[in-house]
Structures are given as C-alpha cells and as structure tokens.
Amino acid sequence: MAPRKIIIDTDPGQDDAVAILLALASPDEIDLLGITAVAGNVPLALTQKNARIVCELAGRRDVAVFAGCDRPLNRPLVTAEHVHGKTGLDGPTLPDPTMTLQDQHGVDFIIDTLRREPAGTVTLCALGPLTNLATALTRAPEIAEKIAEIILMGGAYFEVGNITPTAEFNIYVDPDAAKIVFQSGVPLVVMPLDVTHKALVTPARTAAFRDIATPVGDAVAEMTDFFERFDKEKYGSEGAPLHDPCVTAYLIQPDLFRGRHINVEIETTSELTMGMTVADWWGITDRPKNALFIGDIDAGGFFDLLTTRLARL
C-alpha cells in the first residue's frame, strides 16, 4: 500500500515535535507533503521556527514548512509557555534552523494542495488550534469534499479540561475554528485527553528514548524530562501525557486505538464552558455522528512503536 499523503498542522510544543519526528521516521506509511505552523503553545514566530528545528534534528531539511495564522479567528491568543517553556521546545539545547521558511502562507498551501491532489488522497493532521484548517475551509469550502480525513488532537469528555475546568487547550484557544471544522462534514478522528492521558511518559519510557543514544533520542528524552514536571505536579501521575504523537501513531498503527463514532459539538457562547467538546458518548441525542472519538489506547504498543521508529532517525 502506498504511504498516506498528509499535511501536519502544528504549534510545536515538545509533544508536537515528537509527533513530527514519528512521521518523518515512517516513510513507508506516511508521505509528508508539508508542515503548516499555527499560533498556539507559543506564538507563530516560534512555532514556525520550532517546526524547522525539528525537521533539521531529523536530518530532513527538504520538508516544506509554512507559517499560517498568527491568532485565533475571533479571540485573543492564549499560549502555554507555563507548560512548554518560553521557546516551546525547552529542555534540549537545539540550534536555530538554517532551512528556509516557505514564502507561501500555510492556509494557501493547504488549499492549493487539496485542489491539486486527487480527492480523498490527503489527510490533515492537526496537532494544535484549528485556525489554519478552519480558515482554509471557510476561504475554499469546496476543499472539504477532497479531504480524506482530519485526525486531530483536541478536546476531552470524561477528562474534562486542562486549560479551564471544561476545555482542552487546543480547542479552547480557537473554539470558533473548532466549530467550523467539526461542522465541516469532513471525516474526523479525535484524540482527546481521554486517550492521551493514558499515554504517559514514565521514567522507564524516557530512559528508553535516551537509550537510543542518538541526537534524536537524547532530544526527545530531554523534552519529556522538561514538560513532564508540569503534568506530574498537576495530576499526581507518574509521567506526562504524550498527546500529539497519538495522531501520528494512529496513521501508522490504528489498531492501537479504540473509540466510538459519536456526535461532538463545540461550545462557543458560554465563557464558563468556552471550548468544551460536548461529546455524546452515550448516544443521548439524535444529532448526527460526526467524529470517531478515541477513548482508549494500548500504551505499551504505542511507546514500543515510538521508540522503535525514533531509533531510525
């Protein structure tokens, strides 16, 4: 089977970096057409830079990186330096990138790529706020029927919220964009906190990254060492959730995951619950099912995949 053509839309972020590295380490399954950066974990000036840093860490200066939207559609930007550090990639010491940032806007790249490629052949992998995707869908609505699938990390139901009591960060940053994406009619696979909080980077798993004994392995271990301090203190868990690589792992080995096709709506009017993903897990309403909402993961298999693939770089 030919590798799946994908675009990664991202706001790196240590866990975004690991997701990108996993994609770059998996050419048999993934054909990465380009990376579009969006403001989220840190501002756009840093997310586009971080995306290029990660590509260079993997020895992939050939990957096209584009800067997208620098703010949410209708709200002030909220960032997460308290989790990811001032650069977004705090932990390892990595050199500034020398590879070129593409001149084209990330949204235009998404639109042009979907118009050019045969319908149903390009998957969008969203690791951050959904501003770029929503802007593309709004500006060129005809692309919706050409997207094979959108696989995104975002939202929560049973795990409620991690930036407010009811909202997960990626959805909260731009709930209006999330609403557009969830109502687009494009097939969606959602990796919420309900599943990513089961993918914990324990000390043994961080040691396995370090035991790869390569610049990539060392950098990933240093990244997880850094950002786990926040989540361990917050949740009292033995490690931090490795959120975004779940998206890439699903592309490679979907049988690691289990979920349900359900209806998911996005709250955009109440400040109390702004950005909440209202997931009809129990089928209480007759609203149409619009997402495969993932709820469980084979964490051991996930980390075995991650460690094995990262060792290729």
Image (cartoon, rainbow, N blue to C red):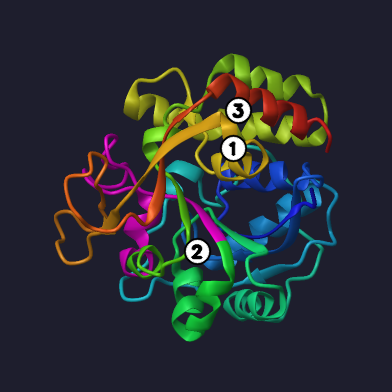
* Residue at numbered disc 2: 43
Q: Say what secondary structure mark 2 lies in.
A: loop
Circles 2 and 3, Cβ within 8 Å, touching? The answer is no
* Residue at numbered disc 1: 254
* Residue at numbered disc 3: 302
- What residue is drawn where x is 79% and y is 24%? 212
Q: Is residue 102 left or right of residue 251?
A: right
Q: Earlier in the sequence, mark 1 or mark 2?
A: 2
Disc 2 to disc 3, C-alpha distance: 30 Å
Are there few (<14), some (14-19), or many (20+) residues within 10 Å of tag 1?
few
**Residue type for callout 1:** Pro
Circles 1 and 2, Cβ within 8 Å, touching? The answer is no
In percent of width and height, residue 92 lies at 67, 38
In the depicted view, which residue is nearer to us: 140 or 1?
A: 1
**Residue type for callout 3:** Phe
Q: Is residue 105 left or right of residue 130?
A: right
Q: Nearer the viewer, mark 1 or mark 2?
A: 1
